Image (cartoon, rainbow, N blue to C red):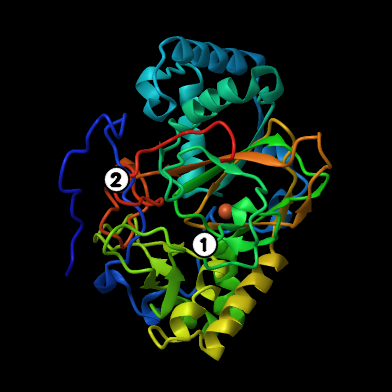
């Protein structure tokens, strides 16, 4: 059976200032993928939540930063800026948060093993401006996970903004750079953070769903669909973001089990990795007979999955200064299409973080070779250096 392996060589510090390189996308360890018969009949516990549990109790999933916490973030950010360290080199050691750290530890546990989402409010982005806000946000993020590259250009601070790309060109365009609707999906990281810098005129609202509740509904109503989602018959597009010699797509499943390490106290959990745009965009290969096209059962499965997420979604509106963190392992997220303000009012703008939680630091036991790597997941092309631009580019 294939085992986890380590990244072969130390990375050059002049390219990767924190000494860590994003491992990027790759195929699963196929012999760790288990057949549908081994999946649970029903999932229980705090990861299974109904929107009714939270819709009228925002205090259970919202934290408004206190003035003391903002001051602590502000001091740490000013010191970091004064030390002239590149933003891509930020870490817990150069961004101390002696008081907030304890709260963030609890939050991280709830993100990784609990309900899987939180909304922070009151981040003073307008007062701080983009540079200091980015420092404070990335610094906060280092307490939740290791930031990873989000695209072929090495962006470790992403900018969700309509830059005018054409959303119908789904084999080359990333939807976060358009104003189109995003169907329920997970990002390529353990945790995703979104900091709202500017809102749209209309739309661009957020929805999240417990993929474990979705799983239970499908297990009860449509086990055939669930089985299709657990089969490693799904090809995911790389959208051209590949390193030299890599395939343009990855064959994998949508719903996995964690690797079983024999620890009866921590039985394997169900893990989801999904984005319909990435399986629908491969006709350039299926038309040429290189990979099979989506079967009727697959098309139905992706439609049923989206419809089921919509049935159990929790709606959330991000205001300026809000930060949403979501765990991709067991929460799916979506956003509505949107319309921006006319200039000169700024366009909708979210700063995005992708954070990794490696297995040896309490992260999920993924059926991927890099499960123990600090910067597991993300998108890394060759030795592209990480960059943290302060706006979309
Ligand atoms: Fe996303």
**Depth order, front residue of 385/143:** 385
Between residue 290 and residue 258, name the one nearer to us.
290
Q: Which of the two discs, 1 and 2, labels the residue nearer the N terminus? A: 1
Residue 133's disc number: none
Residue density around tag 1, few if under 14, some if 14–19, many if 20 or more, within 10 Å: few
* Residue corresponding to mark 1: 44
- Expressed as whole percent of the image width and height from the top left, the position of residue 12 reads 22, 34
Vertical arrangement, residue 303 with respect to residue 196, above or below:
below
Q: Quadrant of residue 355?
A: top left
- Measuring from the top left, give residue 29's x and y in whole percent: 27, 67
SS for callout 2: loop
Please tell me whether mark 1 sits on a helix, a strand or a loop.
Answer: loop
Q: Is residue 91 visible?
A: no
Q: Quadrant of residue 385?
A: top left
**On the image, numbered disc 2 is attached to which residue?**
383
* Residue 131, image quadrant: top right
Residue 83, percent from left and from top = 41, 11
Q: State the quadrant of the C terminus.
A: top right
Q: Is residue 236 left or right of residue 168?
A: left
Q: Residues within 10 Å of mark 2 (few under 14, many from 20)?
A: some
Q: Nearer the viewer, residue 235 or 229?
A: 235
- Ligand 1 is within 8 Å of the C-beta of the residue at disc 1: no
The residue at 47%/82% (across/down) is 227
Q: Nearer the viewer, residue 180 or 58?
A: 180
As drawn, is 341 to the left or to the right of 325? right
Residue in the picture at 74% in, 40% down: 347
């Amino acid at each position: 059976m294939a085992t986890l392996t380590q990244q072969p060589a130390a990375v050059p510090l002049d390219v990767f200032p924190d000494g860590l390189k994003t491992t990027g996308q790759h195929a699963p360890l196929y012999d760790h993928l288990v057949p549908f018969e081994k999946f649970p009949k029903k999932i229980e516990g705090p990861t299974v939540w109904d929107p009714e549990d939270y819709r009228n109790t925002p205090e259970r999933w919202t934290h408004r930063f206190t003035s003391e916490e903002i001051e602590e973030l502000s001091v740490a950010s000013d010191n970091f800026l004064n030390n002239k360290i590149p933003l891509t080199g930020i870490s817990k050691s150069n961004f101390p948060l002696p008081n907030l750290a304890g709260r963030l530890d609890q939050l991280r546990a709830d993100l990784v093993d609990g309900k899987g989402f939180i909304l922070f409010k009151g981040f003073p982005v307008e007062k701080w401006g983009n540079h200091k806000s980015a420092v404070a946000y990335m610094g906060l993020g280092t307490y939740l996970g290791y930031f990873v590259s989000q695209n072929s250009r090495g962006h470790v601070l992403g900018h969700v903004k309509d830059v005018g790309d054409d959303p119908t060109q789904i084999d080359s365009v990333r939807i976060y750079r358009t104003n189109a609707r995003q169907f329920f999906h997970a990002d390529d990281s353990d945790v995703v953070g979104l900091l709202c810098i500017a809102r749209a005129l209309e739309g661009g609202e957020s929805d999240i769903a417990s993929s474990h509740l979705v799983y239970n509904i499908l297990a009860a109503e449509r086990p055939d669909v669930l089985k299709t989602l657990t089969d490693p018959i799904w090809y995911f597009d790389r959208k051209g973001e590949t390193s030299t010699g890599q395939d343009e797509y990855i064959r994998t499943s949508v719903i996995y089990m964690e690797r079983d390490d024999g620890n009866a106290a921590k039985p394997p959990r169900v893990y989801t990795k999904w984005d319909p745009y990435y399986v629908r965009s491969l006709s350039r290969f299926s038309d040429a007979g290189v990979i099979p096209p989506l079967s009727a059962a697959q098309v139905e499965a992706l439609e049923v999955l989206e419809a089921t997420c919509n049935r159990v979604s929790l709606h959330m509106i991000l205001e300026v200064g809000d930060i949403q963190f979501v765990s991709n392992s067991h929460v799916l997220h979506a956003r509505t299409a949107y319309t921006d303000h006319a200039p000169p009012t700024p366009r909708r703008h979210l700063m995005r973080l992708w954070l990794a939680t490696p297995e040896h630091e309490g992260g999920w036991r993924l059926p991927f070779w890099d499960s123990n790597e600090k910067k597991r997941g993300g998108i890394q092309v060759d030795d592209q250096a990480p960059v943290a631009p302060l706006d979309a580019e």
